Image: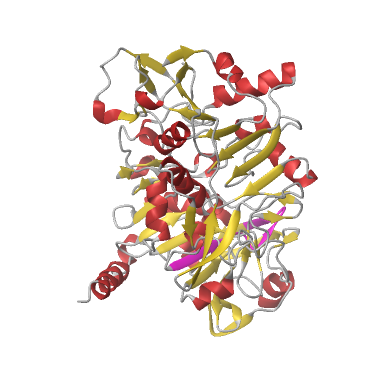
């Protein structure tokens, strides 16, 4: 193992190399110095060229950091990742057809890395069937430059499956907190583990180079063995960056690192706007003991609402990055969590999700059609991707999608238990046709999944005839404020009722006292009994 500079690490990347990159989202354990070194070398010397980058989670600050540093024509040949929304320059190369860009399920890519480490032929999964990931649709392709099929449809024991093909790895860019003189790496200050160990193992098996960025060095033999996340036997080089931040937004939060837990009153408070109304109405679906996923976007506010309402000790909130319990972070820090009970590697979290472990999941929705299908991956000329959306939405027992009713300039006032629209959004979200199918409403209903759609002014469900309106906010006119802004007329419930007026009042809602019994746990026990023949 050698200690080298970031610029020296950049020189180890050759033309045509495939780089596997650890980390998540907006700087969470992202090896930024290593990525920046490759970009600097390209801008100065026009090399390396024709790179393939692979990262299960989107990486970047939605500007110029993270994977966006690879978004130069000539530098990037192919990107395979969960999402490109965090890297606008890569999304633009995809839109223009100047690079091959594939967005595949975050969980599938995370688990595939582990399959590569073990020398197995690839990943077989049900995740992605009947969505744009399915090769009968787009096969995850987001660019006209994409010609290779990375996903195949196969049949095994009378069932359809998707086969995610493996890839070779030349270089891995990983990150930890501390490395000792033998290259053993710990992650004590990181907000997540990701799949750093699996990435190092997979790269070693492929004969590639493993480079790890850390904040500091320690003397040989001084790191406790149980704290080592990446063993030195897998590490070729260490790069020290003493200015390494926990995320792009947060220099260091001890609660993100799990060093302490903060009082409920210390959590940020959301202003009473359309986003908080959606998060509040979603939180009303929580039940005692329920194991839940809190997705990105508007639904990240659910954790803060749960803290405000005193619910965190009664439910198990998780995120796909491997955090269990506590409150998942909101905004651009989503992916981290505070007051969590456990942090596990990301592939194992997706094993749990894919196996049906979630009682309830909350995800954002951008476009919804009459069948209750959802598009979040490509719309309005934007290439976004899917992250863990498909793993989560296809496998939770109960799905709740959250989003504003319209987008682009929406302004509301919530006061005295009523909602007023001050300025209507310019863009419809309830549309006739989806550009891509990220969630298949008909497939969900066929599997027996229960699905709700929550907005600030209306709540829908997937009924026998597709989308059905079941709740309307106090102060809303059905024709003027709802139906006039939909491209289709939904079914309207015979039991149409008003949304709870407490949603539109500044005061806490008192949800802790109303939290219902632990029916999800009972359902899991019944299923386990059936499995064991009891």
- Between 264 and 462, the one lying in front of the other is 462
Q: Is residue 296 above or below residue 29?
A: below
The majority secondary structure of the magenta stretch comes to strand
Quadrant in the rendering for residue 188: top left
Query: Where does the image place residue 503, in percent across and percent down from the top left?
Result: 49, 62
Magenta residues (range):
398-412
Asked if residue 304 shows in the view, the reply is yes
Residue extending furthest toward the left: 534
Query: Where does the image place residue 54, in percent across and percent down from the top left?
Result: 57, 39
Q: Quadrant of the N terminus?
A: top left
Residue extending furthest toward the right: 96
Query: Where does the image place residue 59, in percent across and percent down from the top left?
Result: 57, 37
Q: Is residue 389 left or right of residue 316?
A: right
- Between 399 and 421, the one lying in front of the other is 399
Q: Is residue 165 left or right of residue 89?
A: left
Q: Is residue 115 above or below residue 168?
A: below
- Does 399 lie within the magenta span? yes
Residue extending furthest toward the bottom: 494
């Amino acid at each position: 193992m050698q200690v080298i500079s970031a610029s020296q690490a950049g020189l180890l990347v050759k033309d045509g190399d495939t780089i596997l990159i650890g980390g998540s989202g907006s700087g969470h354990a992202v090896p930024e110095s290593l990525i920046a070194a490759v970009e600097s070398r390209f801008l100065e010397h026009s090399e390396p060229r024709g790179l393939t980058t692979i990262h299960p989670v989107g990486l970047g600050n939605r500007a110029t950091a993270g994977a966006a540093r690879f978004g130069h024509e000539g530098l990037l040949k192919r990107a395979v990742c969960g999402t490109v929304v965090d890297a606008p320059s890569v999304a633009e190369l995809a839109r223009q057809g100047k690079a091959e860009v594939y967005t595949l399920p975050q969980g599938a890519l995370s688990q595939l890395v582990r399959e590569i480490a073990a020398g197995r032929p690839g990943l077989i999964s049900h995740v992605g069937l009947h969505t744009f990931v399915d090769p009968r649709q787009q096969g995850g392709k987001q660019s006209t430059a994409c010609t290779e099929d990375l996903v195949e449809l196969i049949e095994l024991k009378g069932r359809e499956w998707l086969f995610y093909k493996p890839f070779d790895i030349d270089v891995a860019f990983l990150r930890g907190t501390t490395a000792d003189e033998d290259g053993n790496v710990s992650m004590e200050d990181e907000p997540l583990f990701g799949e750093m160990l699996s990435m190092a193992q997979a790269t070693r098996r492929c004969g590639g180079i493993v480079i790890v960025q850390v904040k500091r060095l320690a003397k040989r033999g001084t790191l406790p063995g149980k704290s080592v996340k990446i063993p030195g036997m897998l590490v070729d080089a260490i790069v020290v960056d003493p200015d390494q931040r926990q995320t792009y937004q947060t220099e260091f939060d001890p609660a993100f690192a799990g060093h302490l837990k903060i009082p409920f009153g210390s959590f940020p408070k959301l202003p009473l706007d359309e986003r908080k109304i959606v998060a509040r109405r979603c939180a009303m679906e929580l039940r005692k003991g329920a194991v839940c996923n809190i997705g990105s976007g508007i639904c990240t506010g659910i954790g803060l609402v749960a803290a405000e309402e005193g619910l965190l000790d009664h439910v198990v909130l998780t995120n796909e990055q491997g955090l269990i319990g506590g409150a998942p972070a909101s905004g651009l820090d989503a992916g981290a969590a505070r007051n969590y009970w456990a942090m596990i590697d990301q592939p194992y979290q997706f094993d749990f999700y894919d196996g049906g472990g979630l009682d309830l999941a909350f995800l954002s929705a951008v476009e919804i059609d009459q069948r209750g299908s959802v598009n979040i991956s490509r719309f309005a000329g934007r290439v976004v991707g899917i992250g863990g959306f498909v793993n989560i939405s296809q496998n939770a027992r109960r799905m709740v999608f959250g989003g504003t009713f319209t987008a682009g300039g929406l302004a509301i006032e919530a006061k005295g238990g009523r909602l007023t629209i001050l300025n209507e959004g310019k863009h419809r979200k309830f549309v006739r046709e989806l550009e891509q199918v990220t969630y298949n409403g008909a497939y969900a209903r066929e599997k027996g999944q229960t699905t709700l759609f929550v907005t600030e002014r209306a709540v829908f469900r997937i009924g026998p005839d597709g989308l059905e309106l079941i709740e309307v906010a106090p102060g809303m006119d059905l024709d003027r404020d709802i139906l006039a802004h939909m491209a289709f007329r939904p079914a309207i419930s015979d039991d149409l009722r008003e949304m709870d007026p407490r949603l539109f009042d500044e005061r806490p809602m008192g949800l802790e006292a109303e939290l219902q019994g632990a029916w999800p746990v009972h359902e899991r026990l019944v299923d386990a009994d059936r499995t064991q023949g009891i």
